[in-house]
């Protein structure tokens, strides 16, 4: 179980300290599928980075299975069983997709075994396994490889920061299936930051974060109807039409 | 007979653990330590000085030549001229390389000048590895020179790798290409400590549709310094591309100097050069997979130099 206790995260800007996350507490139970949503700039990605250990909180504590991990490094947290999929995946010149999946799995997988993870995210594995993770890959391809590296780790807690970002409509369908399958098969907990109704729709629990705080939290059945139709979950065109300019 | 140290060096520079298949000439501490020729590949010692002529008959297919050099004696200064004559339509692999082990206080130096004369439509893959070891105060110095003459329609792929232990290198590679000839050069270089490495390439594309691609990937760590100079002269309708991609770490210094000259309006020439640190996000990504910062750095460098 992951527990955040009174977490704050401040950054300095021209006007002094600015609170990105403000005294936020939450728990992610084992085996649960939680989606965090909310307006852009509300602190969702920062929260994911705090959980992965990329950022350290200004105040508060983080516990993983009862152990205080607040001061633990990214590496230590990874080895304790926390995975993190980047919103904007990193490129590596010379490092092949196979290398990255082997590093993620922490074992010398055969190409065929590694291909399984790529197929899982909808990439035709044999075309990709020996490709370099460099600028020759499109944003969507890179994103799916990123998700495959997290799948290969089979962690106790996997955090995905906006997995839908940069993925085209065709691939999105497939991505939903990936998460549906994860929901069925994985024993670990899954935390996804997303704006997508279809991802929200497969959640056990939905947490809405705005202005660094939790504004709503509860079972999907309670939260989803309440937030659908609000600014955080509708697209710009709908808002435009509602404004009466149609 | 070679001693254990020489055998270790041989394994490093030529991946050779035993006597190789096919044609070979092994030079150890300035002396010939073994030679074999085949029906199609002849190796002859030069009469007027140090070095050998390697003559490959026209049409020779899928044969290889190994010509490694090992130096394990401190204070030895070795200079050789090796000339390769590759017949028309041949398709061969040539593996050279030099390993120096110096545990003494005097400098050990090997200067190898390789000249390639590549016949019409011949294909050559040339692999060259450099390696140094030994904890003596004496320097390990390698100054390879490569002169390439390519006739019509010939192809050469040159791979040069220097990953460890060579204190000082000054590499000079020149090439002249006739019509339709194609040259690909890939250099991999890692320097550390107080090492210095200079690589100079000068490629002249003299015939119509000649093309060249000169690619260097390097990593400079600690106090080491590197200079990469790549000149391409387009003297006909041709295509040339040169690229230097370098990772700089610690207090190292790197200069990348690409130079293009077009002497013909149909010469299409491109250069790219980039020097930068390892991106912090790359390290963090690998740390989220459970690697330590040092392991992440090593993986990034290994991949980059692969």
Image (cartoon, helix red, strand yellow):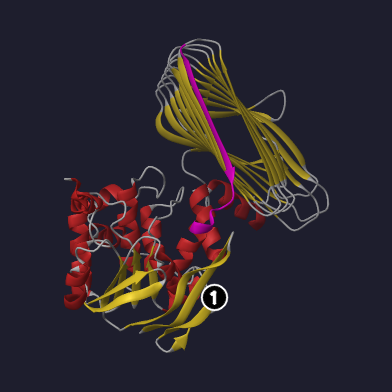
Question: Relative to B69, does residue A89 appear above or below in the rendering?
Answer: below
Q: Is residue B112 left or right of residue A113?
A: right
Residue B56 appears in the rendering? no
The magenta stretch spans residue B158:
no
The picture quadrant where one finds residue B246 is top right
| Residue B92 pos. (x, y %) | 44, 31
Residue A213 appears in the rendering? yes
Identity of the residue drawn at 45% across and 62% down: B285
| Residue A89 pos. (x, y %) | 40, 55
Residue with the mark numbered 1: A58
Magenta highlight: main SS: strand
Identity of the residue drawn at 71% across and 48% down: B224
Q: Is residue A85 left or right of residue A225?
A: right
| Residue A240 pos. (x, y %) | 23, 50
Q: Nearer the viewer, residue A10 or A116?
A: A10
- Specify the subunit that label 1 lies on: A
Identity of the residue drawn at 38% across and 67% down: A44
Q: Is residue B93 left or right of residue A172?
A: right
Range of the magenta residues? B266-281
Question: Relative to A127, does residue A31 appear above or below in the rendering?
Answer: below
Seen from this angle, which residue lies furthest right? B105
Q: Nearer the viewer, residue A131 or A169?
A: A169
Q: Residues within 10 Å of mark 1 (few under 14, many from 20)?
A: some
Seen from this angle, which residue lies furthest bottom? A66
Please count the marks in the image: 1
The magenta stretch spans residue B279:
yes
The picture quadrant where one finds residue A148 is bottom left
Q: Nearer the viewer, residue B9 or A181?
A: A181
Q: Nearer the viewer, residue B290 or B32?
A: B290
Q: Secondary structure at mark 1?
A: loop
Question: Relative to A168, does residue A44 appear above or below in the rendering?
Answer: below
Seen from this angle, which residue lies furthest front? A244
């Amino acid at each position: 179980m992951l527990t955040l206790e009174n977490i704050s995260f401040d950054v300095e800007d021209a006007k002094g300290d600015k609170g990105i996350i403000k005294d936020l507490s939450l728990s992610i139970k084992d085996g649960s599928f939680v989606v965090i949503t909310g307006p852009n700039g509300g602190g969702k990605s920062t929260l994911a980075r705090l959980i992965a250990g990329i950022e350290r909180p200004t105040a508060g504590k983080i516990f993983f299975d009862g152990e205080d991990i607040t001061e633990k490094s990214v590496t230590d947290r990874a080895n304790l069983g926390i995975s993190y999929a980047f919103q904007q995946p990193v490129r590596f010149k010379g490092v092949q997709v196979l290398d990255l999946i082997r590093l993620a799995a922490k074992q010398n997988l055969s190409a065929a075994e590694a291909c399984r993870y790529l197929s899982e995210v909808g990439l035709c594995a044999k075309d990709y396994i020996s490709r370099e993770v460099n600028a020759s890959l499109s944003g969507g391809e890179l994103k799916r490889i990123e998700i495959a590296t997290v799948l290969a780790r089979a962690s106790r807690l996997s955090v995905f920061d906006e997995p839908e970002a940069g993925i085209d409509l065709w691939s999105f369908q497939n991505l939903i299936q990936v998460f549906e399958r994860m929901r069925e098969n994985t024993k670990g907990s899954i935390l996804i930051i997303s704006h997508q109704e279809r991802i929200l729709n497969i959640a056990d629990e939905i947490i809405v974060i705005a202005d660094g705080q939790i504004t709503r939290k509860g079972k999907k059945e309670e939260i989803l109807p309440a937030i659908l139709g609000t600014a955080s979950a509708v697209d710009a065109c709908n808002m435009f039409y509602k404004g009466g300019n149609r | 007979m070679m001693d254990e140290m020489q055998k270790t060096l041989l394994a490093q520079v030529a991946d050779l653990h035993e006597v190789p298949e096919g044609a070979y000439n092994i030079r150890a501490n300035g002396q010939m330590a073994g030679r074999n020729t085949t029906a199609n590949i002849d190796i002859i010692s030069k009469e007027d000085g140090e070095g050998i002529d390697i003559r490959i008959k026209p049409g020779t297919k899928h044969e290889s030549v190994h010509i490694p050099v090992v130096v394990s004696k401190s204070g030895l200064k070795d200079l050789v001229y090796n000339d390769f004559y590759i017949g028309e339509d041949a398709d061969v692999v040539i593996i050279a390389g030099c390993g120096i082990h110096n545990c003494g206080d005097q400098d050990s130096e090997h200067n190898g000048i390789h000249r390639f004369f590549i016949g019409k439509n011949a294909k050559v893959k040339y692999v060259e590895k450099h390696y140094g070891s030994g904890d003596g105060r004496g320097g390990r110095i390698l100054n390879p020179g490569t002169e390439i003459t390519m006739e019509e329609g010939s192809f050469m792929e040159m791979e040069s790798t220097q990953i460890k232990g060579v204190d000082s290198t000054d590499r000079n590679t020149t090439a002249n290409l006739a019509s339709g000839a194609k040259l690909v050069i890939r250099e991999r270089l890692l320097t550390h400590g107080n090492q210095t490495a200079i690589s100079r390439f000068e490629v002249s594309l003299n015939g119509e549709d000649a093309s060249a691609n000169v690619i260097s990937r390097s990593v400079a760590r600690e106090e080491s310094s590197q200079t990469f100079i790549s000149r391409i002269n387009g003297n006909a309708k041709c295509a040339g591309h040169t690229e230097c991609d370098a990772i700089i770490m610690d207090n190292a210094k790197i200069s990348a100097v690409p130079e293009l000259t077009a002497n013909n309006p149909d010469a299409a020439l491109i250069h790219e050069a980039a020097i930068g640190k390892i991106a912090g996000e790359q390290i963090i990504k690998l740390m989220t997979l459970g690697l330590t910062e040092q392991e992440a750095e090593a993986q990034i460098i290994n991949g980059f130099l692969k």
